[in-house]
Structure formats: structure tokens, C-alpha cells
Image (cartoon, helix red, strand yellow):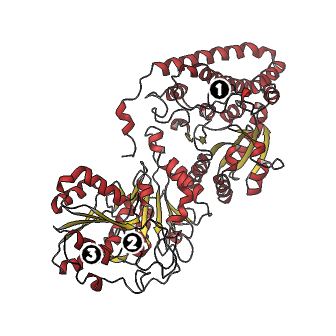
Amino acid sequence: MNVDLALRLLFQMQRIRRVEEEIALRYPQNRMRCPTHLSTGQEAVPAAIAEVLRKDDFAVSTHRGHAHYLAKGGNLPALIAEIYGKASGCSRGKGGSMHLIDLSVGFMGTSAIVGNSIPIGVGLGLSAQLRGSDQISCVFLGDGAIEEGVFYESLNFAALRCLPVLFVCENNLYSVYSPLAVRQPSQRSIAGMAAAIGVAAATCDGNDALACYDQLREAVAHIRRGNGPRFLEFATYRWREHCGPAFDNDLGYRAEAEFLAWQAREPLARLESRLLAADGSAAPRIAQNLAAIEREVLAAFAYAEDAAFPAPEAAFQGVYCE
Amino acid sequence: MTALNFAAAINQALHVAMEMDPTVICYGLGVTDPKAVFGTTANLEARFGKARVFDMPTAENAMTGVAIGASLGGIRPVMVHQRLDFFLLAMDQLVNAAAKWHYMFGSQCSVPITIRLILGRGWGQGPTHSQNLQAWFAHIPGLKVVMPSTPEDAKGLLLASIFDPNPVVFLEHRWLHNAVGDVPDGDLRTPIGPLRLARRGGDITIVAMSYLTVEALHAIRYLETRGIDCELLDLRTVNPIDWPGIYASVEKTGKLLVLDTGYGTGSVAGEIIARVAMERMPSLRCAPVRLAMPDVPEPTSFALTQGFHVRAGDIAATVLQMLGCELADVAEKLPEPIPHDVPGSWFTGPF
């Protein structure tokens, strides 16, 4: 095992987890006043993305985008300030949790409309191809987006023009409260469908950070060599409610046993135990990382809570680019 | 200055833009086919290459998103659809992404895309090949919406649209494609916003857009013989609307007739009348009037479209009524042309 790599992946996952859980903890204070979708339980894929993409690569994401923003290197205090609706938020308070951007690291935006950012990511890939750049464009999407027509249209064009696009599908089995079983035929695979459209595709355990890393690294190298788009489907699971801070298994839309089975395969503990088995001396480094994350996250929340709201007139500014 | 028809003026604007700026690309269904979207995209592929000029999958929504993404990556895409109606599949990308990306992300990036949509009419275009939905687009903050009526404005406004940092919906009427006019050579920018004073007059303000500017001119020529002096404002853009230009004219004439190529209810014309009534009521000497399409899908049959569209005769008769004049010979002097469903003998369909 590459201990340094495993430590970095674990650090990324622990950081994402800590941010999401602090949001969940403070959300009931009613100071974060926007729809907020947490990625707790789904940290492995973004952590691996953080290792395989370059800063100048592009990424676009969805309503559940905090983890992707952080994985791409997005500014943490600006993320929290945005959720608090502050002027120093990453979108100046105009977007909230569902509309995140950090142009300095190629994170080009997230959309609250299912499937909406898929063709935009493909267009960013087209721009890289037209400029003769070796940048790639990473499109995060969920299993619900597969059901949108724009998914087929976008993959078709990416395949047609051999575009440098990495499709990262996190299949967490639910679209809000609707399970996959009522939305897609059980015998059909999402990756298989992407392959049928003409985009080379594979599946992966999305709760195994090292496996995610291996698959993504290979896919990125393939795309960067000019071989066209790749599609990866990651099996993973959302712990908390679709939107908001709570656990909601009491609603009965999914079985407690299913939840517990996924929790038993949760990505942080899995990697940490493998890491410690491979190198017992990693324990103090893990502890150091956790302490650093704790300081960073609490500082980001303190910053966001203290930051100024935008002036009222800002609501009427910026409709058009001058 | 060269005499060009409207379609050739658009073609020239595309050549000028692509020559000036290597980041301009052009795509849409039929862009590289032998008909070249009514000639508007002729010779672009041969001159600028397959990477920058290409036909596309029949995927209006995703290809709009591709334009948005490409623009975020430094490209200036110009898309075209042979009918506005086809583009309705792309309203999600236009409204939820293109119109929002600048505002929603705190003015940090913009979406410089141009979407050309062709407005159909006549020759049985029917319910889904003839819709003039400019009001839908004008309703969305963040979009600019352009509706030229002359070849010069087609060129100048298209170049302005392409180099505008915002998403622009460029609406071109199929019945204008063969209209000829003098067009300045080279780079020409017509500002997006100001209306064009098409005719100065003192008795009544007629606000028109796109093809209805032509019908209005026919009406005005007749009304001149009746001693009526109309002012004609060619709106040119329906978002933004040139309010000072409209108000100044209404203050002078005290009478307002607005012509709209779209359905009447919820129309741009309705917005103009509402705003004038709210802002310039004391100037109005009679109730403002609008002439627009009936709130009915356009039927297909030759028989059913007789008298269906707003024509010069309708405009002239309305002006006469507003001024309290006899209709007299307006019906004989401005009959609906025969056949009524083509802009001229040059138009023989199929679309």
C-alpha cells in the first residue's frame, strides 16, 4: 500500500465528513437558510478525485456539491460563508449551497436542476479541445440524472467529438425518496448504458477510496491521452436525508437494515483500518490530520458566521455582465 | 456599403465575427448542409474549418448546455435552429443555466452565447413551426432578446450579439430573409437596446418589431395619402426595451399602437402598453391599442390562414379608427395579398 496516498485520501475524506457534519450540527440554528444536501457517507469518490485532477482541469457538479467543490480545491471559508448567505461567499450570497463556484481551481459551478450541469461540463471539454489544451472536464452526476434526456444527448456528443470528459456517476440508489427500483429497470446497468452510447464505462465500489483512486487515475490518463470520454459508476450511499441535516430512516422509504449494511462499509473506517494494518506508525499522522481539520473547519464557521451580509442593493446588481 | 438581403447580411456578420475572433464557433442542425440554413451559414465551414463550424446531433437541450460550457471555457458559440419551436426543448439550459450563471455565481463569469432562432410563418407552417415566443425570452432576467427587421440591423445586431458578454436570443423572421437593403461593409455593431426611428411623424406612434415593421411601412404609405403622419418605431430589441425612446414619441403624438408578431396575451406589446399607461398616462389622448396574433395556435390550411395574421390593411384601419377617421377605401387599397401565405413570389416553401 502507498501509505502517503492512503493518508491523503483519508485526510480528504475526513475533511469532507467533518465539514458536512458541522453543517448538520449547526443547521438547526436556522442561520444557514437555504436547501442543503450533504454528502456524508459519499466521501470516497471526491477524495479520489482530489488526487487525480489537476488544478486547471474543469469540474461541474450538482445540488449535492460541497464534497466536489472541496475535492477540486475550492475555498472552504467561502463555501461556508455562501451557505450562510454572506457577501464573501463563493457566489457572493447569490447562490447558496446548491450553487458553488471557485474559478481559481476550475470548479465552474453546480446546478440545482437534475442533469443541468452535464452538457455544461461537456461544453467545457469542447472548449479544451478547441483550444488545444490537455485539460479535462469532470462532470459529477447522480443516478437520478441518468433518467434525464440531457444525459443521453450529452454523452452522445462527448462520444461523437471524442471530448476530454470524465463522467463521475455517484449512484446512491435514491432520488429524493424514490428508490432506483421504481425509476430504472432492475436488470439494466447505468455503466452498461453509457457504454452502449459509446462512452467507455466501468463500475466501481464507491465506498473504497483506493479502488476509486485506481479507477479514476486510469480513466484520467486515458482521457488526457486524447482517447475521448470515460464514464465511471460508483456504488455509494447517502446517510442523511436528501435535503437537510437529519437522519430520516424513520420515514420508512428505506430499510434500516439497508442503511446499517452501507454504514458498515463506510469509506473512512475502511481505509483507516487498512492503513493502520499496513503501517501502524500512521496513527499519529492521522491524529495530526484530524486536529488540523478540526481547527480549519471551526475557523471557517467562525469566519462565515462573523462575515457581513451583502448590502440590500446587491440583489438588483449583476443580472447582466457589463 | 453593399446591397444585401437579410440572410446574406447574417452570413456576412458570421464571416466577419469568425474572421475577427478565432474563439467564435458556429453550429446547429443544417449549418454545413447544402442549404446552409437558408444561406445564412454558407461557406463558413470551407473558410473556418470543421472544428469551428459543424452540424450537430438533434439534441437541442444538451447542445445549448455545450454552448454554455464552451463559453465558460473561453469560446463564443453561435447556435442556430431553423425554427424557434425546435428550441423549446432547450428551455432548461437557456433559463436555468445561461440566464443565471452570471448572477447566480456573483458576477464572476458570464455566458457569451448567441442563439439564432428562425420564426416561421405561412405556407402551412402550422401550430409548431410558426410560434413567435419572444415574450417568453423577454420575461427572463439575464437574457437579451433581439428582433431585427432590416438587413443592416441583422448584421449589426448579430455582431453585437456575438460580442456581447451575455446570452442573446437572436430572432430572425423567415419572411425577412429575402428583404434587400444597403449594408455597411466590414465590422458593424448596432447597440443592443436602442430602438430605430423608422419614420418620423406627429399623429400617432406605431411600435413594431421584426416583420411587422414591413407591414407597418405599407400601412403608413397609404395613411400618408390620407394626410396622416405616423411615427414608426422599430423596436429592434425586446429585452432590453428602449423605454425613453417610446416615451418620447408618445409624449409627442399622444397615441400608441403596438404591433406584435406573437400571441396577444402576455405579449411584449402588452408590456409596452402597460408601462406607457403607468408612466405616461397624461400624454395619452386615446386608449392605446395592440395588434397581435390571436390566442390560437396557427392553423395549417391555406383556407384557415386567410385573414389570420396582422396585415398592413389591419394596421391602417386601426390607425384610422384611433384617429376618428373614416375607413373609406382602406380595404380596397390594402387588401390581403394573393396568395396570402407567402412573403413574395420568391417563397415557395417548403419552410
Question: How many numbered callouts?
Answer: 3
Which x, y percent locates residue A182?
76, 45
Tell whether label 2 touches label 1 (CB within 8 Å): no
Residue type for callout 1: Ile
Secondary structure beneath dot 2 equals helix
Q: For this rendering, which residue is in front, A34 or B7?
A: A34
Q: Which residue is mark 1?
A: A16
Residue type for callout 3: Ala
Same-chain status of marks 2 and 3: yes
Q: For this rendering, which residue is in front, B162 or A301?
A: A301
Q: Which residue is mark 3?
A: B316
Callout in the foreground (2, 3): 3
Q: Which residue is mark 2?
A: B9
Callout in the foreground (1, 3): 3
Who comes first in sequence, dot 2 or dot 3?
A: 2
Which x, y percent locates residue A17?
67, 24
Secondary structure beneath dot 1 equals helix
Above or below, A267 relative to A56 = above
Residue type for callout 2: Ala
Residue beneath the point at 67% across and 16% down: A290
**Spatial distance from mark 2 to mark 3, Cα to Cα?**
30 Å
Same-chain status of marks 1 and 2: no
Which x, y percent locates residue B234?
29, 65
Residue beneath the point at 48% across and 75% down: B39
